[in-house]
């Protein structure tokens, strides 16, 4: 269950409650090894404090009845054994068979969603375990000696997972497990357009599910500042107090660079920006820097010390800088390369990467 904890914590509070459907679930459990008169509870996996149903074991059988808004992941809690088991059910009549000593082997009849969930676990969990293993190896003391092989193995595993994701949702576009799967693998890729394509392949009803709405939110947020999207215009004042807009640079390639005088990595990167500016300024390229400074004096001094001769703007509100918040900036340095039509064509280009990208777009001669 540990691998889902982060997912569930992210989902809490992201989706508004919906009216409950009139029908409910009815679970009849036949689990060997449970103590007579012991309690069994069903809780919401996304909100563990929400108990959906309670029951008592009688002659080895327990009954749980209640309602869920839609098919969802819930947790069976066996109090006397201090054990838990995830199941994915809707408002259905479900029968469980199994043994308390082997909860991974529980058989569930009556829930198509649980069948899909079991396939998900069987098909994906070995690869998730491999990802965890490789991540641990990458953080081990001798990781430097095996950096390339660990990286190659990680990328191969991620690629395999991505292929399996496409296969899963193509066959199960109407399954509520499909958006759950997209939530689970979302952190393995930053390709928001691939995520949107997968989301759009789901049935309309599943898109409106809790997990579906969460994915839609991630898509909308992910498109902010994504390569291939239109850059959002903004206006902020320069060191003399004059307003400067991004749109005023339309017709040029402009690198919008987020930095601050107090940011050491930013200051270390500034010589590369200066070199790129000098090399490409005659080729329809310029830089517009947005500072997350609080002190005007420190900001202006850093501009002078680092010889930053292009346009500089700031509202001196630190991390609450309006443009930084608009572009969801959570760390600096960070930049966006925008083409003459206002489209983002590069992101987080630093050092030789910036030089190479500008050479490809503007020529190196």
Image (cartoon, grey):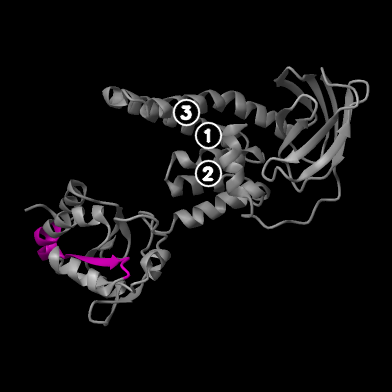
C-alpha gap between disc 3 and disc 1: 18 Å
Marks 2 and 3, the one that precedes in the sequence: 3
Q: Which corner quadrant holds the N terminus?
A: top right
- Label 1: which residue? 165
Above or below, 342 against 181 in this view is: below
Which residue occupies the extreme left position in the image? Answer: 365
The image shows residue 269 at horizontal and vertical percentages of 20, 53
The image shows residue 191 at horizontal and vertical percentages of 42, 46
Q: Secondary structure at mark 1?
A: helix
C-alpha gap between disc 1 and disc 2: 9 Å
Foreground residue, 81 or 99?
81
Q: Which mark is residue 87?
A: none
Marks 3 and 1, the one that precedes in the sequence: 3
Whether residue 204 appears in magenta in the rendering, the answer is no
Q: Nearer the viewer, mark 2 or mark 3?
A: 3
Q: Is residue 251 visible?
A: no
Residue occupying image coordinates x 51% and y 38%:
185
Q: Nearer the viewer, mark 3 or mark 1?
A: 3
The image shows residue 53 at horizontal and vertical percentages of 83, 40
The image shows residue 334 at horizontal and vertical percentages of 31, 56
- Label 2: which residue? 198
Residue occupying image coordinates x 83% and y 21%:
34
Quadrant assignment, res 295: bottom left
- Label 3: which residue? 132
- Which range is magenta? 276-294
Residue occupying image coordinates x 65% and y 55%:
15
C-alpha gap between disc 2 and disc 3: 25 Å
Q: Are marks 3 and 1 in contact (CB under 8 Å)?
A: no
Q: Are marks 1 and 2 in contact (CB under 8 Å)?
A: yes
């Amino acid at each position: 269950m540990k691998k889902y904890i982060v997912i569930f914590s992210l989902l809490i509070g992201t989706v508004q409650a919906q009216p409950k459907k009139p029908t409910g679930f009815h679970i009849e459990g036949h689990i060997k090894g449970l103590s007579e008169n012991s309690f069994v509870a069903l809780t919401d996996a996304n909100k563990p404090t929400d108990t959906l149903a309670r029951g008592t074991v009688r002659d080895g059988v327990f009954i749980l009845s209640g309602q869920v808004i839609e098919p969802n992941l819930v947790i069976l809690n066996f109090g006397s054994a201090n054990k838990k088991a995830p199941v994915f059910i809707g408002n259905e009549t479900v029968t469980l068979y199994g043994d308390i000593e082997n909860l991974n082997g529980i058989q569930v009849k009556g829930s198509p969603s649980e069948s899909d969930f079991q396939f998900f676990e069987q098909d994906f969990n070995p690869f998730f375990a491999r990802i965890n293993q490789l991540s641990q190896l990458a953080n081990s003391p001798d990781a430097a000696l095996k950096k390339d092989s660990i990286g190659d193995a990680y990328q191969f595993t991620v690629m395999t997972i991505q292929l399996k994701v496409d296969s899963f949702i193509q066959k199960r576009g109407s399954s509520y497990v499909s958006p759950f799967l997209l939530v689970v693998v979302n952190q393995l890729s930053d390709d928001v357009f691939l995520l949107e394509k997968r989301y759009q392949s789901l049935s309309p009803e599943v898109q409106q599910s809790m997990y579906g709405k969460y994915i839609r939110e991630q898509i909308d947020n992910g498109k902010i500042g994504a390569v291939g999207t239109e850059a959002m215009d903004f206006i902020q004042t320069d060191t003399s107090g004059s307003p400067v807009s991004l749109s005023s640079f339309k017709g040029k390639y402009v690198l919008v660079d987020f930095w601050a005088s107090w940011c050491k990595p930013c200051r270390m990167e500034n010589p590369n920006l200066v070199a790129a500016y000098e090399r490409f300024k005659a080729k329809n390229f310029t830089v517009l820097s947005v500072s997350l400074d609080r002190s005007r004096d420190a900001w202006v001094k850093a501009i002078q010390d680092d010889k930053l001769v292009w346009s500089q703007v700031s509202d001196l509100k630190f991390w609450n800088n309006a443009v930084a918040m608009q572009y969801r900036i959570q760390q600096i340095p960070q930049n966006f390369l925008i083409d003459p039509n206002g489209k983002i064509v590069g992101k987080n280009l630093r050092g030789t990467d910036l030089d190479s990208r500008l050479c490809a777009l503007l020529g190196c001669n």
